[in-house]
Image (cartoon, rainbow, N blue to C red):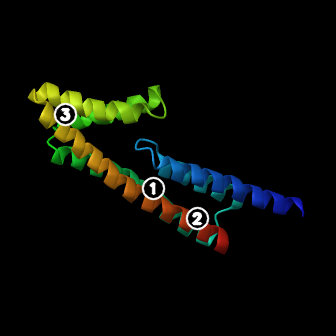
Amino acid sequence: MNWDEVLKYSIFGITQLFMLVGMFGLIVPVYPGTVVMWLAALGYGIMAGFSGWGVFFFVLITLLMLGSTVVDNLLMGAGAKQGGASWKTLGLALLGGVLGTLLMPPVGGIILAPLAVLLSEYVRLHDWQKAWSALRGLATGWGLSFVVRFLMGALMMGFWWLWVWVG
């Protein structure tokens, strides 16, 4: 085995590892799994080269990453809104999710975002039942967004495998 083959298989193995870390991360609601997968594909492209097919598949991977980020936030927000949450509450939940993730990774966002919904809605309405309804809406949106993000992540990995195969 020559050094070119060792390098080729090493690049593939490292990229695959990061793709799997991204896929596993999709289970955690505030972990940017598709962004990790996109970064892995970018690294692969830089190291292995962007052939004609590589550019095509990287564009598809990029569109899926952007789409998953937008869909994720829309579904969670829509679920909470359907449960009765106000726009202010949605903003506080987003802020809580981001700050929680930064200050107490990896579970801080999972704790602070729902807590922000529950407490903000209780303060706004003085009704625990309505606050819990908003929280259930957020949880429903999270569940639906997980399914969508996971499918998009699987497509991203599939497109990367095609890139490796045809590249």
Q: Quadrant of residue 115?
A: top left
Tell whether 59 sits left or right of 18.
Answer: left
Q: Quadrant of residue 64?
A: bottom left
3D distance between C-alphas at marks 1 and 3:
27 Å
Q: Residue at x 25, y 35 (%)?
A: 91
Residue 52 percent location from the top left of the image:
61, 71
Q: Nearer the viewer, residue 130 or 96?
A: 130
Going by the numbered disc 2, the residue's amino acid type is Trp
Q: Is residue 64 in sight in this rendering?
A: no
Q: Is residue 8 left or right of residue 135?
A: right
Q: Kindly identify the amino acid type of the residue bearing the numbered disc 1.
A: Met
Classify 127 as above or below 147.
above
Mark closer to the chain start, 1 or 2: 1
Quickly name the residue at label 3: 88
Numbered disc 3: secondary structure: helix
C-beta proximity under 8 Å, tags 1 and 3: no
Name the N-terminal-most of marks 3 and 2: 3
Give the residue at mark 1.
Answer: 65
Taking the image as shown, residue 22 lies to the left or right of residue 111, namely right
Residue displayed at 23% across by 48% down = 79
Q: Which mark is residue 160?
A: 2
Q: Amino acid at mark 3?
A: Lys
Question: What is the secondary structure assignment of the residue under circle 2?
Answer: helix
CB under 8 Å between discs 3 and 2: no
Q: Secondary structure at mark 1?
A: helix
Q: Is residue 27 above or below residue 122?
A: below
Q: Are marks 1 and 2 in contact (CB under 8 Å)?
A: no
Measuring 19% from the left and 33% from the top, which residue is drawn there?
88
Disc 3 from disc 2: Cα separation? 39 Å
Above or below residue 166? Residue 106 is: above
Q: Quadrant of residue 158?
A: bottom right
